[in-house]
Image (tube, helix red, strand yellow):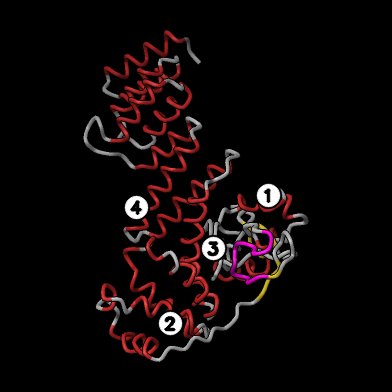
Amino acid sequence: GGTPEEYRRLAKFFEKENDPARAGDMYAACGERSYAVGAYLRDADKPGVLDKAIDVVGEARDDSLTSTLVDYLMGESDGVPKDANYLFRLHIALRDYDAAAKTTVLIARQEQEMGNYKMAHRQLYDAHRELTGEGRRPPPDLTESLMILHSYALVKLRVKRKDHTGAARLLRRVARSIDKFPAHVVPILTSTVIECQRADMKRSALEFATLLMQPEHRKQIAEAYKRKIETIVRKPDRTEAEAAASPCPMCDATGSEWDLVCDSCSGVIPYCVATGKRVRTGEWARCPECLFPCNAGDFVDVVAQEKACPMCSREVSLSAVHPLDDPLATIGRGSKVMNEANGVHGMNEE
């Protein structure tokens, strides 16, 4: 490395050469942080340059530098708001984890409302990883939003495997939060009715068919399904196939394998990323790549066919998937800590 004076001279040279990004590198190297950020922002269209500005501001912890960068990212200086992911990264660099989480939930919600479910899922997953990597607990609204989107993503997988019960249970979970899917209310409710009928969940099919018959939705129902849905409402059948039972991993009380909150101990039970069901004692494992919980057998079954983890989309070595010796130790013990495992609140079937 050179002396501060040499870096300063190089910075001036690059300024003259009209190369602000490299000038910024030199200013950063000699500790002239405000000059470095100024230079980076003049060249922020170049790949990676905004990230450098974020790193410098994160190190500086200087209020005026922070507000300069925030103004730039919000579009105060040029009227063009930048990709909100930069704002998330800035909050992480400043170790302001609450603001980082709020930013993510906001970005994901906007994507979700526009029907960009894959992008919203990715956004929430990346933030979850980033926050847990920093030893922080992702807030409940982030983990719950991710759980709902992941449940929706799993529907295709279950249908492909001719698991209509799994698809129906997942769709019912999604349909209970249908206000979070404004771009596709009618198609999602229609799929829910069809899959619930197939899975002998007639009462649930009736519930969502009735919702579809409301004036604001009725006109949008696809012709192919209109008569079927009308018949379900006209001739109500309230029988319902019972969900298979599965013991709570904390207190062993039996409950529906789809209920993510134990009725007995009130603990929040992590869900398997391959099926959306609660994790089972003796089967509870983790994806070796993203460390999200799963039931070993179900996870291996899905990954063998899909070649990747349904949560992180990374290729997984099947030999690395095995039940954990003491799964509760990986997240701490007791229902309070279970609430933090993947933070799903009040997500029971009834």
Q: Amino acid at mark 3?
A: Met
- Along the viewing direction, whichever of 201 and 274 lies nearer the viewer: 201
The residue positioned 34% from the left and 52% from the top of the image is 110
Mark nearest the camera among 4 and 2 is 2
Q: Judging from the image, what secondary structure is the residue with disc 2 in? A: helix
Q: Is residue 59 above or below residue 149?
A: above
Quadrant in the rendering for residue 314: bottom right
Q: Which x, y percent locates residue 317?
A: 64, 59
Count residues near mark 3 (Cα–Cα under 10 Å), then give few for <14, some for 14-19, many for 20+: some
Q: Judging from the image, what secondary structure is the residue with disc 3 in? A: loop
Q: Amino acid at mark 4?
A: Gln
Q: Using the numbered discs, state the Cα–Cα distance from disc 4 to disc 1 in whole angstroms.
A: 31 Å
- Residue at mark 1: 331
Q: Amino acid at mark 2?
A: Leu
Tag 3–tag 4 contact (CB < 8 Å)? no
- Residue at mark 2: 206
Mark nearest the camera among 3 and 4 is 3
Count residues near mark 2 (Cα–Cα under 10 Å), then give few for <14, some for 14-19, many for 20+: many
- Residue at mark 4: 110
- Residue at mark 3: 347
Mark nearest the camera among 1 and 2 is 2
Q: Reading the chain from its start, which is encountered first: label 4 or label 1?
A: 4
Count residues near mark 4 (Cα–Cα under 10 Å), then give few for <14, some for 14-19, many for 20+: some
